[in-house]
Every structure is written in C-alpha cells, then in structure tokens.
Image (cartoon, grey):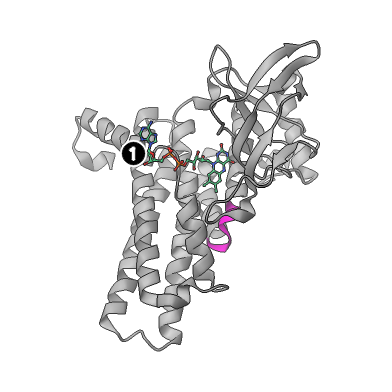
C-alpha cells in the first residue's frame, strides 16, 4: 500500500515530495533481494501510473485490491506480434502476449500496454491466475525469483472501464523515461551491499592491511557514493515540475550510465578481491552478482546515453547547473 496516499491507507511514496523516501526504500530492498525489489518497483510504478492517469473509480478499486493483498506491475515488453485488442460485444477481446513480465502467474492486477491506432494504451487487468503463463520462458543467468516470464492473453475479454488514461499517456515524459531512476536506486542497493560484503570479508580474513585490497575497497566506496549522489539528485529532479521533461530525462539517462558503470566496476572489484569464494554458493556475493549482472540489462542504454549527450549540446548555460 506504501505507494498510495496516506488518505488511501498508504505512505504516499508516489508523491513528489516523497521520492527521496522511495529512493531509500528501493535501495534497502535492492540490498536485500533484487527479485523482490524488481516486483516492488514494478508495483510502485503501476500504482503511480493509476494515480496519475486513472479515474477515481480505478484508483479506489486498485487501492482496495492491494489492501486485500494483490500486486500490480507494468508489463510493456512484447514480441514482434505484440498485444492487440479487438472490439467485442462486452468490450474488447485481447489477442497476443507479453514477454518479460515480472510476477506473471501471481500478479493479478497488472497494467499491460496495448497498441492502438492512436498510440499505446494502458489496460488495468483483473486476472484470475489461470492465464497461460510460460513458466519455462525465463532461462537467464539471474533474477529467477522475480518470476519474469511470458503470459498469453488471447481470448481475455476486458471492459472499456479498464483502460487507464488516454492513448499516449504511458509514454508521457518525463515519467516514462525519467522513472528509470527507480531501477537505478534498486541496483545501487545491491552495489552497496556488495561493497559491505567485501569489506566484511577483508576484515574477517584479516586481509585488510593489503594495499591492493584497500585500493579495491576505496574504489568500491567511490563508485557507490558517486552513484548515490546522482540517483538522489535524479529522484529530486524527477519530482521537480519546474524543470522541463527533456532536462529530467537527460539527467536520468546520465544517471543510468553512472549506475551501470558503478555496478560493473564494483562486481569486478569484489570478485577479484574475494576470489573464488565470491563465486561459490551459497555466498551472497555469488547470488547478488548473478542477479545484478542480469538486472543491469535495461532497455536501449546506447540511445539513453546518446539522447543525454544531445540534450547537453542544446544547453547554453554552463554545464554546472545541468549536471
Ligand atoms: C529481471 C528483469 C525483469 C523485467 N521485468 C519486466 C517487466 O515486468 N515488464 C516489462 O515490460 N519488462 C520487463 N523487463 C524487460 C526490460 O524492461 C527490458 O525490456 C529489457 O531488460 C531490455 O534488455 P536488453 O538488454 O534486451 O535491451 P536492448 O534495448 O535490446 O539493449 C541491448 C543492446 O542493444 C542496443 N540496442 C537497443 N536497440 C537497438 C537498435 N535499435 N539498434 C542497435 N542497437 C540497439 C542497446 O543499446 C544495448 O547495447 C525485465 C527485464 C529484466 C532483466
């Protein structure tokens, strides 16, 4: 319920002034378990979308269902055929499937995107749990517990009242691309945890006096601290409606780069510093590196970097206020 407002029984984590708190929660969850954090991040994103674009009836119904224990999420990824809807006597009949849908099989109130002639629309589904989930579809290195799989909706009939907002709302900026700061915060939680585990290992094995290991630990601390500064600032800018959407998106795109680099660097430093021990189950470093290296793969990183550089070139002010 935390993403709903206090009046709705939540903690207001979708509200602009609470994005700093959301950042802390996402980091804590990322440190504990990246799969749980993925599900929470998707749930929070979906609640925010319904709060921003949904009708009062949709908001009230989702708040009720979440209070009863249901989860939501945002399932946008699809195969080449995509998800389509066809007019039906009772509303619309869906055809097609979603891929890479976290929580497929137990998330009952997801938002799915569906292509229309006017652009993608969001549909807030009410699933029974008997839908056709391909449980064999996730064979990636890590993130198995996120239950990220394909789900086929062909034949499902939905009512007109299940569309959230208007066509195009889903991709409205800065919310669509700028929301990426949230997965950066999740990743950072895991990166911070890796650094702590490395520190503890050095101390417990009495290897902390070695100058090479000290340098590795210092580099981990610099990488995590740098990512934290960027991500906290990105969360603030995301919530600042005085900034242009283009500015917020560019800042978050740069933040994605900083976070990915921090994750890759810290994994390498920790794996080299701990040696084989960090690759042997059930050591938490093994699990975190497996999950983090998978979850760091996010959509179109090159485009995010290139768009950010483009935005920087349009700036006429000194770089300082931008970055
Ligand atoms: C654990 C996990 C859970 C997920 N859960 C969900 C979920 O619940 N809902 C959901 O909708 N999605 C989910 N996703 C999918 C996620 O949103 C992304 O779609 C996915 O991670 C994209 O990863 P990718 O590396 O294939 O990206 P890509 O964008 O394919 O990037 C791969 C590489 O190709 C480059 N590239 C991209 N486009 C082009 C192009 N046109 N030409 C040339 N190069 C290109 C990129 O810069 C990058 O170098 C999940 C992903 C993960 C890992």
Image position, residue 147 (x, y; %) = 65, 49
Up the image or down, 40 lies above or below 247; here it is below
* Pick the front one: 82 or 289: 82
Image position, residue 80 (x, y; %) = 53, 27
Q: Residue furthest bottom?
A: 206
Mark 1 C-beta closer than 8 Å to ligand 1: yes
Q: Quadrant of the C terminus?
A: top left
Residue drawn where x is 36% and y is 75% of the image? 273
Residue 244 at least partly seen: no
Residue drawn where x is 38% and y is 45% of the image? 256
> Is 33 within the magenta?
yes
In the picture, measured across the screen, residue 91 lies left or right of residue 53, that is: right
Q: Quadrant of the N terminus?
A: top right
Residue drawn where x is 55% and y is 11% of the image? 117
Image position, residue 305 (x, y; %) = 31, 39
* Pick the front one: 320 or 200: 200
In the picture, measured across the screen, residue 306 lies left or right of residue 169, that is: left
**Secondary structure at numbered mark 1:** helix
> Is 165 within the magenta?
no
Residue 227 at least partly seen: yes
Up the image or down, 229 lies above or below 205; here it is above
Task: State which region is magenta.
Answer: 31-37
Up the image or down, 11 lies above or below 263; here it is above
């Amino acid at each position: 319920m935390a993403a709903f407002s206090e009046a709705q029984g939540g903690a207001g984590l979708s509200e602009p002034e609470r994005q700093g708190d959301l950042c802390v929660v996402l980091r804590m969850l990322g440190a504990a378990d990246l799969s749980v954090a993925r599900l929470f991040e998707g749930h929070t994103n979906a609640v925010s979308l319904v709060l921003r674009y949904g009708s009062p009836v949709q908001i009230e119904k989702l708040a009720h269902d979440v209070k009863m224990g249901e989860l939501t999420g945002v399932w946008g990824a699809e195969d080449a055929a995509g998800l389509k809807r066809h007019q039906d006597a009772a509303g619309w009949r869906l055809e097609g499937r979603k891929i890479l849908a976290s929580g497929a099989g137990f998330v009952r109130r997801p938002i799915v995107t569906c292509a229309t002639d006017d652009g993608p629309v969001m549909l807030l589904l009410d699933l029974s749990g008997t839908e056709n989930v391909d449980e064999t579809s996730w064979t990636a290195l890590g993130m198995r517990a996120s239950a990220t799989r394909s789900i086929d909706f062909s034949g499902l009939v939905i009512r007109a009242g299940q569309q959230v907002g208007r066509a195009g709302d889903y991709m409205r900026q800065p919310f669509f691309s700028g929301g990426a700061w949230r997965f950066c915060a999740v990743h950072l939680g895991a990166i911070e945890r890796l650094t702590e585990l490395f520190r503890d290992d050095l101390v417990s094995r009495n290897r902390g006096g070695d100058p090479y290991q000290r340098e590795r630990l210092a580099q981990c601390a610099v990488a995590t601290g740098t990512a934290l500064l960027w991500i906290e600032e990105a969360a603030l800018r995301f919530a600042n409606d005085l900034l242009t959407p283009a500015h917020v998106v560019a800042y978050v795109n740069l933040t994605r780069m900083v976070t990915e680099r921090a994750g890759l660097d810290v994994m390498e430093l920790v794996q080299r510093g701990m040696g084989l021990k960090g690759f042997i189950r059930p050591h938490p470093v093994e699990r975190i590196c497996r999950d983090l290296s998978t979850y760091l793969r996010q959509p179109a990183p090159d485009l995010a970097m290139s768009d950010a550089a483009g935005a920087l070139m349009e700036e006429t002010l000194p770089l300082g206020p931008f970055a």
